Amino acid sequence: MEGTGLDRPGKKPENLPFPLTRARKSMRVSRALGLGICGLALTACASAPMTPEMIANNDPYEATNRETLKFNGKIDRYFVIPTVALYFVLVPEGGRRSVHHFLENLTLPTTFVNDMLQGEMKRGSQTVARFLVNSTIGFGGFLDPASKMKIPDHGEDFGQTLATWGVGEGPYLMLPFFGPSNPRDAFGLGADVALDPTNYIHYKQHLWWFAGQKYFTILDLRAQTYTTVQGIQRSSVDYYASLRSLYRQLRENAIRNGRAVKSEDLPDF
Amino acid sequence: MRFQPILRRTFLATLLSLSAAFVARPALAASPAEDFVQTNIHKGLELLNNKQLSSDQRRTQFEGFLLGLTDMKRIADFTLGQYRRTASPQDLAAFESAFQNYAVAVYQSYFAKYAGQSLKVTGSQQRSGDDFIVATQLIDPNDKSGQPPLEVDFRVRTDSGKPVVVDFSVAGIWLALEERDQFTAFLGQNNGNIHTLIAHLSDLAKQFRGN
């Protein structure tokens, strides 16, 4: 999972210069192991020597993070991309779009819980409306009539909720398999599993369903971001630093819920 | 006595008008920056949409347009971060030239993806007397997703006499900021050697122009 998984859902990724929205997608891919991996990463990095750049970039584990990115790149190249290629061959574009809508619909209960925890009543009502419309006349979420009805899509996760409660992001982390993160967002990954009401519906095939959902989420995410990630790799002077910057800026934008940046937060030019 | 409420209302109305005038001042001042963005980006998109131009003509004209619109020297210096202070004037000039080459090639490739779309200015913020952030939306007439249009912001400085774009953001990502993060990290990994960065930028520019 070398990619950030930050493309704009529903938009053609090839039209975008860099991964554009919603780190939540990558967040959701990586819920279950977030906490444990975060702890492992911190332990593994503890002995890395610090440089002024690491401190300035709030990236004290940069050396280990860079190694993790290389590892993720190999997983991506040898396991994920071949599967994505097969997915492209076997499933036509319309089918892939339906899978994307279906998976997105499954995330809406968690989005709603986070909307409420952030006190975002209007966005919460939009999430409920999207879920009801797409689950019914959208044939269980495979179609997206809600967007046609101008009910906008948005994402929320517990990492963002923590941010709105004033929790700082902490140092930058590159998680094995899951990509860019930080302690706050990694904690959020685990918390989102607990917040997802659908995880409390137990039935015979529950675990298979859970595993299948995660598998297809990874597939969908990588299929959506393939061209964009390739574009970043091609144009980057330092791919690692580029991902770090993009991740942070996207997260800040997601936390602001797309509201305009405060001009005083921008650097002098 | 009857006149007292009327006088009070008149006084309040005057006060409100004056307050409105003060509140409106930044918005009015922001208008030239908004006009600048609307007019120029529209020109750029028109250039990309002009089917009568050959790809070479389009590339040359777009390069001229981009260099007229932006302050490349200023952007280049910004992207060097703390390394700008220690760079020699010769190295700085060589870097600015390499950056311009790289930026034109990369930005052109970015903008080309938006051919066929139109830009709508939605507002602006005034950061200081000569520093504006103009908010726009990129409207894709072929987009049937039903999702909101892409938000693109432009940072416009007017302190050099004429307005120039010094950075732009797509969906919250500021490009020059991202470049600065990359370049300073690259220099950190290469003992602050600007020549290595210049060589790398030149290679990337060649690759982009080759495609």
Image (spheres, coloured by chain):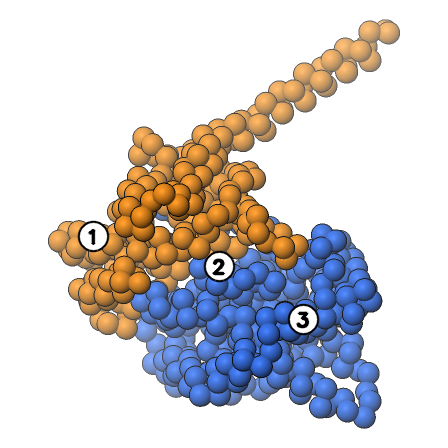
Residue position marked by numbered label 3 in the rendering: A98
Q: Eyeballing the image, is A117 above or below B143?
A: below
Number of other residues with Cα within 10 Å of mark 3, as a class: few under 14, some 14 to 19, many 20 or more: some
Residue position marked by numbered label 1 in the rendering: B97
Cα distance in 3D space between marks 2 and 1: 28 Å
Q: Eyeballing the image, is A39 above or below B152?
A: below
- Report the residue that reaches farthest toward the left: B90
Cα distance in 3D space between marks 3 and 1: 47 Å
Dot 1 falls on a residue whose secondary structure is helix
Amino acid type, residue under disc 1 in the picture: Ser
Q: Which chain carries label 1?
A: B
- Report the residue that reaches farthest toward the front: B52
Amino acid type, residue under disc 3 in the picture: Ser
Q: In which quarter of the image is residue B16?
A: top right
Label number found at residue A15 = 2
Which numbered disc, 3 or 2, marks the residue that appears first in the sequence? 2
Chain A: drawing colour:
blue
Question: Residue A65 at what x, y percent from top left?
Answer: 42, 79
Nearer to us of marks 2 and 1 is 2
